[in-house]
Image (cartoon, coloured by chain):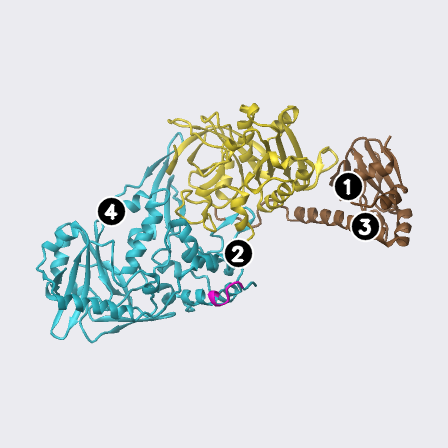
Amino acid sequence: MRTLERDSFDRLLEALQRRGYRVIGPTVRGGAIAYEPVDRSAELPVGVTEEQEGGTYRLRGRDDQALFGFANGPQSWKRLLHPPRVRVWRARRDPDGFEIQPEPIDPPKWAFLGVRSCDLHAIRALDRTMLEIGHPDPAYRARREGTFIVALNCGTAGGTCFCVSMDTGPKATFGFDLALTEVLEPDRHYFLVEQGTELGGEVLAELPTAEAGEPEREAAQRIVEHTAASMGREMEADGLKELLYRNYEHPRWDEVSDRCLTCGNCTMVCPTCFCTDVEDVTDLEGNAERWQRWDSCFTVDFTHIQGGSVRSSSRSRYRQWMTHKLATWWDQFGTSGCVGCGRCITWCPVAIDITEEAAAIRATDGEKR
Amino acid sequence: MTIADVPERFRVASSRRENEDTWTVELEPVGRQGLDFAPGQFTMLYAFGAGEVPISVSGDPRRPGTLVHTVRAVGAATRAVCAVREGDELGVRGPFGRGWPIGDADDLDVVLVAGGLGLAPLRSVVYAVLAERERYRRLVLLYGGRTPDQLLYRDELAAWSGRDDVEVRLIVDAADQTWHGQVGVVPAVVDRAELDGGGAIAMVCGPEVMMRYAVEALVTAGLPAERVFLSMERNMRCAVGHCGHCQWGPSFVCRDGPVYSWSEAEPWFGIREL
Amino acid sequence: MKSIADLLAEVPTFVGLSEGHRELIAGCGQNVIFKRSEYVFREGEPANTFFAIRRGSVALELSAPSTLVIETLHAGDVLGWSWLFAPYRIRTDARAMEEVHAIAFDGACLREKCEADHDLGYELMKRFAQIITARMQATRLRLLDVYGAPVAEPRS
């Protein structure tokens, strides 16, 4: 464990840039935290925090100069690893028929700066879906393998998040090259830096760090404990899969669907929602392209057969999303789809709360409509 | 061998119209070997610029050089596929999915129950069974459709009916007086087939409602749930378990199916709008 | 040569009847044969007879206005339920598709026997109700037109 002073933070960015990484980190964009290319620490959300509640998100000023004094925004790292629109191949007509050119896979080399523990779990979950179970996606692999990850142990809970009950944080325990904990004291602003991989160690070696002493380690520990004690929500995760499997006909699904607009915001902000669609487009010159783009199970004909849509009611679509996230993900991928980041609660226009819905069903387990 | 990510070119060797909106297309590979497929699997057929659709293979598995697909024109992509003529090209990805358990049918009566377009994936089973006829006991094909002229493969149905090692029973929803066969619903034909429940394996394919009632009739006839199989339809888009469209409870139909045993399927079948 | 009562015991619908009831019903029955294309009964006629088909097939037809076969019945099936329920009128044509051997039962006679013996009436009601519900289920299934073209055009 090492310490890095705030004033030397840019040395970290420089070390990454020297190695050819494009640093992607949190910035303030359009009144929210967004992950964008970052060259200098001054571009980070310095002295910014946020207020998150069901259906509510506002950035606020802090009375300090913390670089990472907030929790998360509407985006997650899936926007980069599993982009909203990707061309898969191009085709053109030829005299015999047509010819297809697969899209070359050559992603930029990224360094993700400030990845929260919940989002590390989300990246691992995406790895399960895109690489480990079933057919691997070569484009995802290329993006993923080149990426350097600097994790950040949260000093501030988000207001709607619940990583503690999902066992996904706040401390980052895997999946990073380096992990930082930001410590602000009256006369000192510094970071604890933990090495996660050999590559992380190489970058760390280029930075002006000092050996972390006992008081510094304890300070970092207290920060994580404080975050863990400030969770805005709680999910009772015990037996959640079986609970949902035996409550497909629970009247709560009707109740929540009275509120749900099927707008799909939750699926867009969720860091593990991975559903996509393929779109074939043509121009007037005989060229065709296939694109892969994000899709949402909240659309009415997301799943259909020749007889029509399978989930025509909003009730069945909300149920599909929630039971997938909390139950069938386990059987499909051996892990929960929910990492407790709270984004779906914050960004739902009508403040539907996945923890509240699960608790309501648990309280009246077995009820049928 | 599976072509997973990018379609490969196949040339249309022939196209035959089955009824007012259904065509059977035979495809030959361009510059590659034929695809090995198992009856019950499907491919993603691509019509240039129009899109891709999941279609069951319905050819003879011993002739992988030719891919045969029966397609119903219901949307832009399927209409484009149905419009092809000899010499045109289509793209193919696949084959995908889990096929029919023909390997578990030794010394059993093989009972095939098809409705409408559902005969297409079962036709490959008929070919496979006839190729090694002595391995199986009865071969019973029960096939229902809307009207007599909607039935698929009528030449082959006639040929199979003429054999004494195949039993073919056809039934339609309604007919005129020129039809000398049965009129009613498929479950009734199952009831009348005098099946030996303990010694049969059944494979069912057709509209979901029809499969539900056919399976009920098969179970009533004594077949155990582990020996009744059905083929689920869903709108596969990627066909490799990534896009999420074909999910049915915890299952990805493109990858865990489309063939399921009734013992696997039953708990999920009963959930409305799953 | 089997008696009508013996033949009746082989008809699936009448399984489980007491010997006494079987004798009663058999007393109203006689063997009949229809030639191919002969009408067994016609829509609108008074419904006073029902049949247990022993051999051959019968097509139930409606005129719409061209003739449509709406159901076929085969060996082991019971043909005709209108005899048991007012207004006792035949609702469809029934035509022999090939030579048909059947037992014809005098429905009018049986109706009287049912009035006198309610146990007999209950046993027949149970069995005919089952025939009718099975036909209705089949009809509902066809109403869904499961083989028909899709209702809404899917995206592709």
- Which quarter of the rendering shows the C terminus of chain A? bottom right
Pinpoint residue A111: horizontal percent, then vertical percent. 20, 54
Q: Which residue is mark 4?
A: A145
CA neighbours of label 2 inside 10 A, class few (<14), some (14 to 19), many (20+): some
Q: Nearer the viewer, mark 4 or mark 2?
A: 4
Q: Which chain is disc 1 placed on? A: C
Residue C123: numbered disc: 3
User: Chain B, which colour?
Assistant: yellow
Q: Is residue B5 magenta?
A: no
Of the image marks 4 and 2, the number of the one nearer the N terminus: 4
Residue A312 badge: 2
| Residue type at the position of mark 2 | Ser
Q: Nearer the viewer, mark 1 or mark 4?
A: 4
- Labels 2 & 1 near each other (Cβ < 8 A): no
* Residue type, label 3: Glu
Q: Secondary structure at mark 2?
A: loop
Q: Which residue is mark 1?
A: C61
Camera-side residue of B25 and B84? B25
Query: x and y percent of residue A209 in the render?
Result: 9, 60
Q: Is residue A93 above or below residue A368?
A: above
